């Protein structure tokens, strides 16, 4: 059983908000009171476009953070997807 | 800041079309000469110049203005993505309000038609996790359209109606690149660029320049100029979208709210607006952001003709918008200002919005996709 890949983000204690990608400060308030958090790797497609044969989607992770990634062009809004790391490209596949 | 402190004294622009062989300097000379003539001022009256361009390169202002009698005084170069021209105009006003000068010129220029395909916004040598997904500018707007369709029931026909309206209006605009009408069937049948956006729903990459001369109210009075008043201006940048935080209002909503508040006016006061329709979905989103209709209702509102001549709202994009006129990035915002000024002065010819008294100019800049926008500028203008 392979552990599903997970995305790292940053959580700001003052803003009570998490952000992707993980950076050293809170992107909203600039504060350094932040910690790296595991955002999980599964979520739901909220918006999708097809550019040529490739898809790009906005994905709402189950943790609540919105991210974006390449997807199979056939995926539609509402599809459940998981993050996968075959290469350097941020990509989600259907589950 | 709703006092009538700053006047637009004159505007001018080249046609926006494919004319890359003319070069930046020739385009700037035509636009600036037209604005000077329109204002009745001489080059020696201009005390500072703000030159906007995205891809024009270093010292674009000095390179293009040096033979126009404007050298020797401050020349400031401005880059703020697609909102560069509007930002240059705000910078010019800041110098007036600070008392640095009484008259300033904002000019924007861009040559884009020489490159093929969607606008390249990647900085050479810099990587971005977003660009590696394959996303480009049409795709970025396409995702907004996808979300709108899912959350608000926006239809393909409503998307197409924006293009049909703007292309029809552009048949009357000699400054527009496209001057022929298209049908909804032609719009939806044109090649798919980034679903659901087809080619005709994407603005053409063109070349052009536009110029706007601003001065203090006192200078306008002393020299007997015909003012169009800047009642308010607002500039925002976007905030992070990849978060679980409740979404704050995006840059466009915040800029519009700030401009209305500063002007002491509201969307119901507008007679005419130029709005940043780089893509069909853009006009829908920003018609909503300008408060002309409720959020989510823009597609229906435009499709039923509310922002067409004779509709119940202000006429939006009487020029034909970026979808028809084209989008020479640094010049676009100032071209929008020129259009609204012509309407407010009753000089818009066969496309004149009757009795136009209050106008809005809305310009977006975008490509840093971790933010909802790079920049958004809103101006509220009033005829004298």
Image: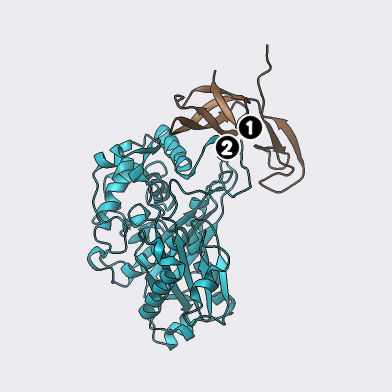
Chain colours: A brown, B cyan
Binning the other alpha carbons within 10 Å of mark 1 as few (below 14), some (14 to 19) or many (20 upward) gives few
Binning the other alpha carbons within 10 Å of mark 2 as few (below 14), some (14 to 19) or many (20 upward) gives some
Question: In the displayed structure, would residue B122 be above or below residue A21?
Answer: below
**Quarter of the image where one finds residue B357:** bottom left
Question: In the displayed structure, would residue A44 be above or below residue B214?
Answer: above
Residue drawn 52% across the image and 28% down it: A71
Question: In the displayed structure, would residue B247 be above or below residue B80?
Answer: above
Extreme-front residue of the structure:
B21
From the viewer's perspective, tell me whether residue B297 is left or right of residue B165: right
B39 or B57: nearer the viewer: B57
What separation in Å lies between label 2 and label 1 (alpha carbons)?
Answer: 8 Å
Q: What residue is disc 1 on?
A: A88
Residue drawn 47% across the image and 70% down it: B107
Residue drawn 46% across the image and 40% down it: B139
Label 2 sits on a secondary structure element that is helix
Q: What residue is disc 2 on?
A: B132
Determine if marks 2 and 1 fall on one subunit: no
Residue B306 visible in the picture: no
Percent x, y for residue B383?
Answer: 36, 72
Residue drawn 56% across the image and 30% down it: A60
Asked if disc 2 and disc 1 are in contact, CB closer than 8 Å, the reply is: yes
**Which quarter of the image is occupied by the C terminus of chain B?**
bottom left
Chain for numbered disc 1: A
């Amino acid at each position: 059983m392979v552990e599903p890949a997970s995305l790292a983000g940053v959580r700001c204690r003052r803003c009570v908000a998490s952000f992707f990608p993980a950076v050293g400060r809170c992107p909203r308030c600039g504060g350094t009171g932040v910690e790296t958090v595991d955002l999980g790797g599964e979520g739901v497609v909220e918006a999708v476009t097809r550019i040529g044969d490739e898809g790009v989607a906005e994905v709402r992770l189950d943790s609540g953070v919105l991210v974006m990634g390449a997807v199979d062009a056939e995926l539609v809004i509402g599809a459940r997807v998981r993050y996968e790391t075959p290469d350097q490209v941020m990509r989600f596949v259907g589950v | 800041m709703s006092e009538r402190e700053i006047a637009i004294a004159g505007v001018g622009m080249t046609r926006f079309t494919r004319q890359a062989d003319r070069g930046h300097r020739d385009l700037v000379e035509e636009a600036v000469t037209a604005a000077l003539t329109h204002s009745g001022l001489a080059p020696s009256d201009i005390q500072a110049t703000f030159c906007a361009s995205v891809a024009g390169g270093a010292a674009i202002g000095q390179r293009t203005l040096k033979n126009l009698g404007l050298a020797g005084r401050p020349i400031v170069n401005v880059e703020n993505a697609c909102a560069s021209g509007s930002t240059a105009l705000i910078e010019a006003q800041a110098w007036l309000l600070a008392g640095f000068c009484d008259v300033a010129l904002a000019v924007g220029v861009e040559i884009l038609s020489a490159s093929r395909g969607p606008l390249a916004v990647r900085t050479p040598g810099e990587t971005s996790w977003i660009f590696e997904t394959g996303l480009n500018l049409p795709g970025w707007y396409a995702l907004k359209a996808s979300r709108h369709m899912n959350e608000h029931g926006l239809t393909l026909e409503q998307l197409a109606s924006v293009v049909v309206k703007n292309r029809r209006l552009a048949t009357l605009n000699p400054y527009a690149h496209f001057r022929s009408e298209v049908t909804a069937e032609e719009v939806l049948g044109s090649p798919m660029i980034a679903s659901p956006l087809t080619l005709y729903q994407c603005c053409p990459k063109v070349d052009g320049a536009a110029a706007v001369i601003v001065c203090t109210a006192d200078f306008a009075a002393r020299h007997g100029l015909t003012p169009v008043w800047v009642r308010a201006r607002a500039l925002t940048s976007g905030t992070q979208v990849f978060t679980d935080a409740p979404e704050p209002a995006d840059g466009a909503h915040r800029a519009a709210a700030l401009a209305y508040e500063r002007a002491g006016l509201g969307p119901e006061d507008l007679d005419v607006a130029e709005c940043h329709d780089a893509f069909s979905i853009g006009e829908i989103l920003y018609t909503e952001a300008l408060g002309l209709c409720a959020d989510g209702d823009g597609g229906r509102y435009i499709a039923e003709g509310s922002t067409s001549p004779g509709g119940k709202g202000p006429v939006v994009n009487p020029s034909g918008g970026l979808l028809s006129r084209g989008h020479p990035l640094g010049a676009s915002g100032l071209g929008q200002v020129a259009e609204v000024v012509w309407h407010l002065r009753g000089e818009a010819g066969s496309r004149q919005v009757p009795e136009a008294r209050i106008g809005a100019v809305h310009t977006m800049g975008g490509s840093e996709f971790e933010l909802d926008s790079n920049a958004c500028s809103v101006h509220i203008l009033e005829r004298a």
